[in-house]
Amino acid sequence: MKIILMLISILSMNSLTTGQTGIFYPFGSDAGDVNNIGIEDENSTYVGLLSPFVFFGRMYHQIYINSNGHLTFNNPSSVFIPNSLPSNGSEDVIAALWTDIDISQNGNISYQEYTTGSVLTQATQDINQYFPDLSFTATCVFVVTWDKVAYFYHTGTETSFQVVLISDGNLSFLLINYGDIAVSPNLVQGGYDTINSTHYFLIPESNNGSSISNLKYSSNVNVPGRWVFRVDGKADQNRETVIGLQMRVISYSDLAEIENIAYVMEKIKQELVHQGLPSNVELNLRRVEKIKP
């Protein structure tokens, strides 16, 4: 009998179980941030960027900070029930923790754009650590922080998270940092989406209000609470890892037909995307045969 071993190359995500410490970039009044105080879910702030940011091939000179935990580029958004990712919509969206947030009673949203100083040094070091083949030097960093905000109609739900956009004018990166995240009774989504969902990513467990407190322990760069993506669209934003998937078949003819192989690969891809991998993940099939007497 022959055992067919399929090795599939995918973009892997790591889930960590160690504590989160000090991953936020400087924020708040001590850092010189602009405070963005609004009423419940009707608040969106327009920011004209000093340096344009490229997001999957589209260059933006402005951004909207929406109080419900997400950023948009073309239009403000007061939507408090998040679109499920992928949404196949008409707007590029960064959904750090998109849910119904009320900052009228508790918490603060602040932001700052840096073009000089130690924050650029920090960003340069971070990106070169996560993408060592790029020799990257940050020229602009935009930081938005939701600090101890609460969910609408639910007191005692202090939640903190942060978006960091990093660019050198050519390459662009997205960092999402999670601090203490309260369990949410509301619908929630975390990740990013693009126009027509040509690229999107749903952070695992970020669409489940009962488990989002685990976000402070999860990561794709071995830094608890931090998720990092390359988002200029010129290259895959995550590093490739080979993961083994073992299948036993009675006869090789089960997979000999091209149609059967394509069907199996498509089903595997659908499941991986459902679990949070990007929709543009590529699966490569390699067959290894071991013949037993």
Image (cartoon, rainbow, N blue to C red):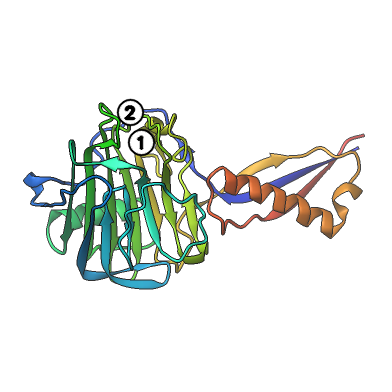
> Percent from the top left, x then y, of residue 69?
31, 47
Q: Quadrant of residue 257?
A: bottom right
Q: Amino acid at mark 2?
A: Gly
Q: Indicate the quadrant containing the C terminus: top left, top right, bottom left or bottom right.
A: top right
Q: Nearer the viewer, residue 226 or 251?
A: 226
Residue depicted at x 52% and y 54%: 86
User: Which numbered marker is on residue 19?
Assistant: 2
Q: Is residue 250 left or right of residue 165?
A: right
Q: Nearer the viewer, residue 21 or 6?
A: 21
The answer to whether the residues at label 1 and label 2 have Cβ atoms under 8 Å apart is yes
Residue that mark 1 sits on: 224
Residue depicted at x 7% and y 45%: 30
Q: Nearer the viewer, residue 80 or 133?
A: 80
Q: Nearer the viewer, residue 7 or 262?
A: 262
- For label 1, the SS is loop
What is the total number of numbered labels drawn onto the structure image?
A: 2
Q: Amino acid at mark 1?
A: Pro
| Few, some or many residues within 10 Å of mark 2 (<14, 14–19, 20+) | few
> Percent from the top left, x then y, of residue 239?
48, 53
In the rendered view, tell whether residue 27 sits above or below residue 150.
below
Q: CA distance from mark 1 to mark 2?
A: 6 Å
Q: Earlier in the sequence, mark 1 or mark 2?
A: 2
Residue depicted at x 49% and y 49%: 84
Q: Is residue 154 left or right of residue 1?
A: left
> Percent from the top left, x then y, of residue 262?
77, 57
> Percent from the top left, x then y, of residue 108?
17, 43
